[in-house]
Image (cartoon, rainbow, N blue to C red):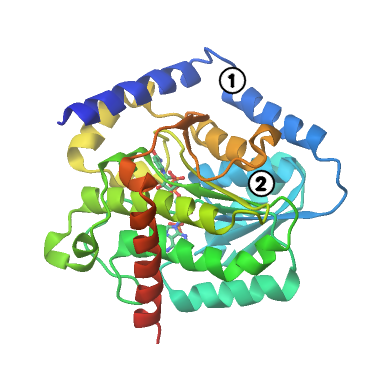
Amino acid sequence: MKVLHVIHLVIEFTYSFLIKFDVWASSKAKLEQYVLKYKKANTSTEEKFAIVTGANSGVGFETSKALALAGFRVIMACRSRESTEEAISKLELETGLKTFEFIQLDLSSFKSIDVFVDQYKKSHNKLHLLVNNAGIAFCPYTKTKDGIEMQFGTNHLGHFKLTNDLLDLIKASERARIVVVSSLANYHGTFDKSLILEESKYNKANNYGISKLCNIMFSNELSKRLAGTGVTVNSLHPGAVNTNMVKNYPGSLVNILSLLKLLILIDPIAGSLTSIKVALDPELEGVTGKFFMHEEEATQLSEALDEKKCKELWDFSEELIIKHST
Ligand SMILES: NC(=O)c1ccc[n+]([C@@H]2O[C@H](COP(=O)([O-])OP(=O)(O)OC[C@H]3O[C@@H](n4cnc5c(N)ncnc54)[C@H](OP(=O)(O)O)[C@@H]3O)[C@@H](O)[C@H]2O)c1
């Protein structure tokens, strides 16, 4: 295991420990504070809309709940109608609110993204918050419906297309925010086209890191392109969270995690704190192009801050979409 991995594990461990054992305040109380702070600052009576991708489970589920409590109408953009309807029933019961909506979205299909955007635009003319939360991790080599490596195709490219296709509505909405859920794994990524395009170079952990670095590079490039529009874009790592995703972690990591599970993995409520802070905190008004973890701004890889590289990723993403669209 590399020194960097150990350092990251120690940081995660410390944060998780402090959160799990309520050394600061309970994560539920912290979430309530973020919601209250937002509600106090937001005096507008206009109905606000938020889209959360991958909202039916884990971090996305808890993020959707907090956003609804903050007053948003939450559009849950998920693959499965059945599991999302189940999630909505649970959310309605837990919040007493009926402000959740399902629109089907499979980020691994350009066609599905087109249908989602059409359907959203038919019934909504504003979008105040987009939370690009959905993700897959450590899957064996597979391709999206459009023939692109699955982790890059879903985690980065699907969200790249979705965001761009919704930008007109986002720009038309007052003080809109785009929140991109990346991962600590970004620190182990590098943007190298051959690692994305060539199956023989595929490594499930490395390619997850690449997709998560691309989340941040996209977020940074978009924040630059949206300068002066009032729309902000930030990315984040949610923590090491006990969700469906960790079941797919590579063997060695699973062994370590199962051993230290009680101490390391935080619950999805705690895992949604950074997303909620970045989405709602009035003190982050105008803050854009930043990366957050453990609820605070964090350092970014020099590659993520390299404007030439970020632009290169943007052009590459556009080219792939054109090339692979039928
Ligand atoms: N858990 C962690 O420790 C951790 C650490 C760092 C970063 N993250 C990031 O946190 C985010 C949320 O993950 P989680 O931990 O909450 O895991 P999760 O419970 O597995 O949630 C992932 C969500 O993404 C959805 N999804 C996957 N592929 C999709 C597709 N093609 N189209 C639409 N939705 C799709 C899943 O839908 P289905 O239910 O249909 O599969 C699910 O709703 C991810 O971006 C992940 O990379 C998690």
Q: Residue flagged by tag 2: what amino acid is it?
A: Leu
Task: Name the image quarter holding the C terminus.
Answer: bottom left
Residue at image mark 1: 26
Corner quadrant of residue 107: bottom left
Quick check: 99 left or right of 215? right
- The residue located at (34%, 62%) in the rendering is 312
Q: Earlier in the sequence, mark 1 or mark 2?
A: 1
Q: Give how far across and how far down residue 180 sits, in percent.
A: 50, 49
Residue 145 seen in the figure: no
- The residue located at (23%, 31%) in the rendering is 5
Tell which of 115 and 291 is nearer to you. 291
Q: Residue flagged by tag 1: what amino acid is it?
A: Ser
* Labels in figure, total: 2
Q: Give how far across and how far down residue 224 sits, in percent.
A: 52, 54
Q: Is mark 2 within 8 Å of ligand 1?
A: no
Image position of 222 with respect to 24: above or below: below
Q: Give how far across and how far down residue 86 sits, in percent.
A: 59, 54
Quick check: 243 left or right of 61? left
Corner quadrant of residue 26: top right
Q: Which mark is residue 91?
A: 2
Tell which of 127 and 85 is nearer to you. 127
